[in-house]
Image (spheres, helix red, strand yellow):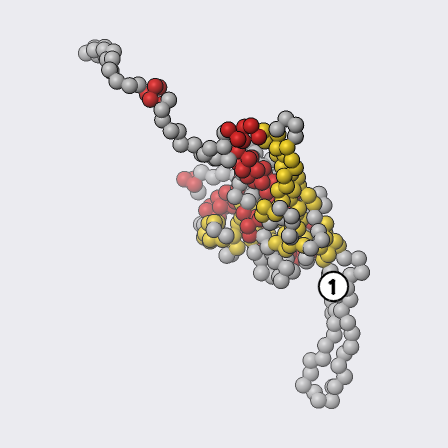
Amino acid sequence: MSEKPIANISINALGREAAYQLANVTKTTPQFGALTPRWLTRVLEFRGLDAGIYRVNRVVEGDTPLDALCSQDPKKVTIPQGYVEYETKPREYELSSISTIINVDTKVSDVYSSPYDQIGEQIALAVESLRERQESQIINNDDYGLLKNVADGQRVHTRIGRPIPDDLDELISRVWKEPSFFLAHPRAVAAFERECTRRGVPPVTVNVAGGTFIAWRGIPLIPTDKLFVDGQKNPRGQVGKTNILLVRTGEAKRGVVGLYQAGLPNEQSRGLSVRFRGIDDNGVASYLLSLYCSVAILADDAIAALEDVEIGEYYDYRTI
């Protein structure tokens, strides 16, 4: 049975295209796809500095740094004497600066700032970009970055390439004094979840800093794309190698501490200032954004790294 052709029906009414000209379009603020939650800077404890320098004074430790009397014999009354030695050349961390300049044509901002302020949106996006760079520098900076400053004795290689529970347990054995969180690329987190599922021990979830994360032995795995896979934030292939960190944070715990400059002029947020530079002869307004940051590892056992983590192993669970 053949289908009957549908006749073109002309509607005697206002059309969509013409009506659109009178409609109010609901708009969003600019959406920047490269932005991330930056969980690391949320869970890391920070210390504000007065003059941009942070000195880590360590004690020179030995097998028995200070002897002590421990006896119930009243005849033994001689109390050992001594002192605790300090390092004479402790490491000092100087804040690094991350800066950018935003230019906005005042004619554009005057005319096109409803419903969103053009200058405010430009500065907001620039601030987000600086914060992204800050998190990357905390992990990857050649001088103070976490990856480059893990002690040799705190570096662990995977047993079979894939991140298995035994590997994370080994990290815990290296950072056993109140470990705070694991740090891993989202693909590494997924690879670890697959290994746990394969072994029938799916990790539980915990709530930290307003987010929900999987946890191993009660320690959350915090995702970040700043721990690169083969040098890339967003690897295109399914295979690749990365690192997983275990961190203890906090000055009181002799852990890892984020650093920033406190009390900046025109401070917009922690360690970040926004300064108006003026308007040039062409009516272009200029704003300088400066972010001052660093990170310090107070003790060697505050951080450990699992190296050469393979992320590309998948399983057909029907055959297991």
Give the residue type that dot 1 points to: Val
Residue toward you, 268 or 192: 268
Residue toward you, 261 or 229: 261
Query: In the image, what residue occupies the spot 71% across and 51% down?
Result: 52
Q: Is residue 147 left or right of residue 42?
A: right
Residue 306 spot, x, y in % from top left? 62, 48
Question: In which quarter of the view is residue 68 placed?
Answer: bottom right
Residue toward you, 93 or 316: 93
Q: Which residue is mark 1?
A: 59
Question: In which quarter of the view is residue 243 placed?
Answer: top right
Query: In the image, what residue occupies the spot 62% across and 30% down?
Result: 284
| Quarter of the picture holding the N terminus | top left
Residue 78 spot, x, y in % from top left? 76, 84
What residue occupies the far bottom of the structure in this picture?
75
Query: In the image, what residue occupies the spot 48% across and 44% down?
Result: 194
Task: Say if residue 224 shows up in the picture.
Answer: yes
At numbered mark 1, what does the secondary structure look like: helix, strand or loop?
loop
What residue occupies the far left of the structure in this picture?
1
Q: Is residue 161 left or right of residue 294?
A: left
Query: In the image, what residue occupies the spot 72% across and 57% down?
Result: 56
Q: Is residue 153 left or right of residue 221?
A: right
Residue 166 spot, x, y in % from top left? 56, 52
| Quarter of the picture holding the C terminus | top left
Residue 137 spot, x, y in % from top left? 65, 43
The crowd level at tag 1 (other Cα within 10 Å; few <14, some 14-19, many 20+) is: few
Task: Say if residue 103 shows up in the picture.
Answer: no
Residue toward you, 87 or 244: 87
Total label count?
A: 1
